[in-house]
Image (tube, rainbow, N blue to C red):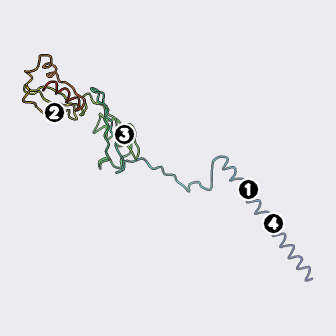
Amino acid sequence: MKKSRLALVFVLSTILFLTSFSLGYKLMNEKYKAQSLAKEKNIDRSMDNEIEIIKEENRISPNTSIEERVHYKTCGHLSTELSVANDDIINMTRKEYENYLESNYPDKKLISFSREKIVLWGERNHLCKEHYIIGEENGYIAIFRIDDNGNKILYKIFEDYPISILVEMDRERIKEGIIVDNEDELSDILENFIS
């Protein structure tokens, strides 16, 4: 009798073990099939609503460099100025910065925008600051510079050289203004009039 009880416990234990094993196998197999199906459809159900991807917007930082390109239509020169972002524009998004430009600098256009660098474009209908103009001031030969707005600014007057000592053709050229591209050219042309 003792042996029959032991045999009965062994058989029941074996049946219980096999039943739980096959039930566990069946459940795991169904879960594996469901995951495989989800992957085929690009759905990972185990990750649903657990991870939220946040895309950080490009914003202007204190280290953002600003490159401003200006085309001067009269002389055809292109100047480039580099600066860093000032306090007024730090933390602006692209849209906010476009609105800022439209309100404060309508002549500047935004070419590119990133956290590292902003590129602006502008055009002016006058000479750039690199030029000199040889002209006349109070009857004397004078040199003018160009300011940011394209206005002539008196740089130097040669009071020892009135334009009246020049031949008629040179007087007319001086009165119209002779545009000079650099200091070397300025020296050469002045030498012709002053020597």
The one nearer the camera, 158 or 98, is 158
Report how far apart the C-alphas of labels 2 and 4 lie in the structure: 101 Å
- The secondary structure type at the circle numbered 4 is helix
Considering every residue shown, the one lying at the far top of the view is 168
Q: Nearer the viewer, mark 3 or mark 1?
A: 3
Task: Examine the rendered structure and indicate whether residue 16 appears above or below residue 115.
Answer: below
Q: Disc number at residue 153?
A: 2
Report how far apart the C-alphas of labels 2 and 1 lie in the structure: 87 Å
The one nearer the camera, 30 or 8, is 30
Report how far apart the C-alphas of labels 2 and 3 lie in the structure: 30 Å
Q: Nearer the viewer, mark 4 or mark 3?
A: 3
Report how far apart the C-alphas of labels 4 and 3 lie in the structure: 72 Å
Amino acid type indicated by mark 2: Ile
Report how far apart the C-alphas of labels 3 and 1 lie in the structure: 57 Å
Q: Disc number at residue 30?
A: 1
Q: Disc number at residue 50?
A: none
Circle 2 packing at 10 Å, graded few (<14), some (14-19), many (20+), is few
Amino acid type indicated by mark 4: Thr
Residue 57 is situated, as x and y percent measured from the top left of the image, at 43, 48
Residue visible at 48% across and 51% down in the picture: 54
- The secondary structure type at the circle numbered 1 is helix
Circle 3 packing at 10 Å, graded few (<14), some (14-19), many (20+), is some
Tags 2 and 3 touching, CB below 8 Å? no
Q: Disc number at residue 119?
A: 3
Whichever of callouts 4 and 3 sits on the residue coming sooner in the sequence is 4
Residue 149 is situated, as x and y percent measured from the top left of the image, at 22, 33
Residue visible at 84% across and 69% down in the picture: 15
Q: Nearer the viewer, mark 2 or mark 4?
A: 2
Q: Quick check: 165 left or right of 51?
A: left
Name the quarter where the C terminus is drawn. top left
Whichever of callouts 2 and 3 sits on the residue coming sooner in the sequence is 3
